[in-house]
């Protein structure tokens, strides 16, 4: 008993009381908080256990969220690119979950279709060093893309990427 009383200081007593309160509060929280008490979208993804959230719980879609990329496509344009809509030579993402397709209309002129997507705005860039690309949307999900080479003064079949915000 004498050994305990020699180590019994004010700081030790306060620290033990604080430890008991902290442990008691955690135990209370564990016994009282359940899934109904947690606000939706309030837990960061890195705090979730791996493989507990599947694709069905992840919000996807074409809703109006600021900063959301609703679609993108990279088209491997070439002189032999098909003149009918195809997914061959096209890699991309579509917020609707449907396919992204492209077709060649003429030299340097293409159409890219994000099936089921309501988007009408896009940003397009060409991969050629001095080539430029532009896009227009005649209807939701459909974009006309032109790839042009200013130094040569002509349209050109060159790979391009289109992003729909």
Image (cartoon, rainbow, N blue to C red):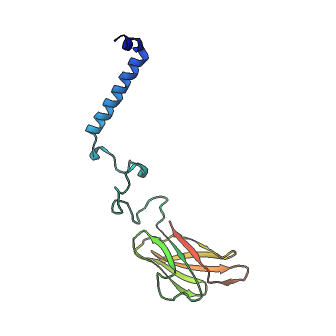
**Which quadrant of the figure has residue 27?**
top left
Position above or below: 160 against 1: below
Query: Residue 39: x percent and y percent?
Result: 34, 46
At 38% from the left edge and 50% from the top edge, which residue is drawn?
48
Q: Is residue 118 left or right of residue 146?
A: left
Q: Note whether residue 151 is visible.
A: yes
Q: 96 or 53, which is in the foreground?
A: 53
* Residue at the image point whose x is 39% and y is 65% from the top: 61
35 in relation to 86, above or below: above
Residue at position x 34%, y 26% in the image:
21
* Quarter of the image where the N terminus is located: top left
3 vs 33, left or right, is right
Q: In this orientation, which residue lies closer to the viewer: 73 or 147? A: 73
Q: Quadrant of residue 64?
A: bottom left
Closer to us: 14 or 86: 14
Task: Tell me residue 41's x, y (percent).
Answer: 37, 51
Is residue 41 shown left or right of residue 157?
Answer: left
- Residue 38 lies in quadrant: top left
| Image x and y of residue 163, in percent | 53, 69
Of residues 81 and 118, which is closer to you in this image?
A: 81
Could you tell me if residue 9 is visible in this image? Answer: no
Location of residue 116 in the rendering, given as x and y in whole percent from the top left corner:
40, 74
């Amino acid at each position: 008993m004498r050994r305990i009383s020699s180590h019994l200081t004010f700081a030790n007593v306060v620290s033990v009381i604080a430890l008991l309160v902290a442990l008691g509060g955690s135990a209370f929280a564990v016994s009282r908080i359940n899934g109904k008490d947690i606000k939706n979208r309030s837990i960061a993804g890195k705090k979730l256990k791996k493989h507990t959230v599947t694709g069905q719980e992840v919000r996807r879609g074409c809703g109006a969220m600021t900063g959301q990329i609703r679609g993108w496509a990279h088209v491997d344009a070439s002189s032999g690119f098909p003149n009918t809509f195809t997914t061959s030579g096209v890699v991309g993402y579509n917020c609707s979950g449907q396919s992204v397709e492209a077709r060649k209309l003429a030299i340097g002129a293409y159409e890219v279709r994000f099936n089921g997507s309501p988007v009408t705005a896009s940003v397009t860039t060409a991969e050629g060093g001095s080539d430029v690309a532009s896009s227009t949307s005649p209807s939701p999900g459909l974009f006309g893309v032109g790839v042009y080479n200013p130094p040569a003064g002509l349209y050109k079949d060159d790979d391009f990427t289109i992003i729909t915000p």
